[in-house]
Amino acid sequence: MSDVLHRITKQYLKSINTPEYPITEWIHNPILPACIPKFWVIESDNIREMTAAEKTELTYSTESTVYLIAEKQLLTNKNGYDYEGNANAIINPVMPACALKYTKVVDDIVVEMTTEEKAVVDLPETERIESKTSLEKAYSNAISQLQIIQNTSAPTGAQVITAVKQMAAIQEKLLKFIYRNNF
């Protein structure tokens, strides 16, 4: 009776009848390294533990964590190589201690949003729609003022000032809308 290790699958069987396990497929009475089987490397009839670099490579290719920026989604146990070069992904990020919906990326680092940004994320959809409607109305009013000036051969100073104020107001509303809706 002997112990055997399958050369490909790394299946380890104890106290078996060795003639039933051909030496071409099985290593008889192997000396096993003191590590988990996924870190075993079989070389001829010898089994060794992977080097630190080999372990890092294996872990990166099978156990990477990937943060998808646009989706605000965290994937685990992925092949890091599959996401290299993907501008929407950060591989093995250090994550802040907050809900994923409160994360954002700054200089390729996942960070927690500010209190103001979190409030916008938590803003009900109806308020977002109202903000958009308000923005569209302000834009329409500003365009009307500009058209009045264009259609007037000699606009008054008051007309120009009114149009400029409305354009400034629309710019402010637009910037707030963009900020609130994470564009």
Image: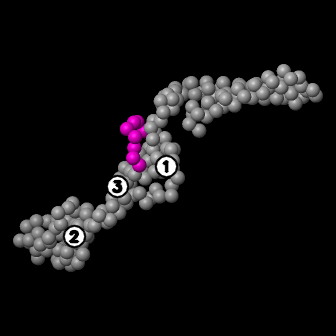
Q: Position of residue 179 (x, y in %)?
A: 58, 34
Q: Which residue is mark 3?
A: 63
Query: Of the residues under marks 3 and 2, which one precedes in the sequence?
Result: 2
Q: Residues within 10 Å of mark 3 (few under 14, many from 20)?
A: some
Residue 172 in view of the camera: yes
Mark 2 residue type: Arg
Q: Position of residue 118 (x, y in %)?
A: 48, 31
Q: Are marks 2 and 1 in contact (CB under 8 Å)?
A: no
Numbered range of the magenta stretch: 93-101
Q: Nearer the viewer, residue 20 or 124?
A: 124
- Please give the label number shown on residue 41: none
Q: Are marks 1 and 3 in contact (CB under 8 Å)?
A: no
Measure the alpha-carbon separation of dots 1 and 3.
Answer: 20 Å
Mark 3 residue type: Glu
- Please give the label number shown on residue 108: 1
Residue ranking furthest to the right: 153
Mark 1 residue type: Asp
Q: Which residue is mark 2?
A: 48
Query: Of the residues under marks 2 and 1, which one precedes in the sequence?
Result: 2
Measure the alpha-carbon separation of dots 2 and 1.
Answer: 38 Å
Depth-wise, is mark 3 or mark 2 nearer the camera? 2
Query: Of the residues under marks 1 and 3, which one precedes in the sequence?
Result: 3
Q: Position of residue 73 (x, y in %)?
A: 44, 44
Q: Quadrant of residue 29?
A: bottom left
Depth-wise, is mark 1 or mark 3 nearer the camera? 1
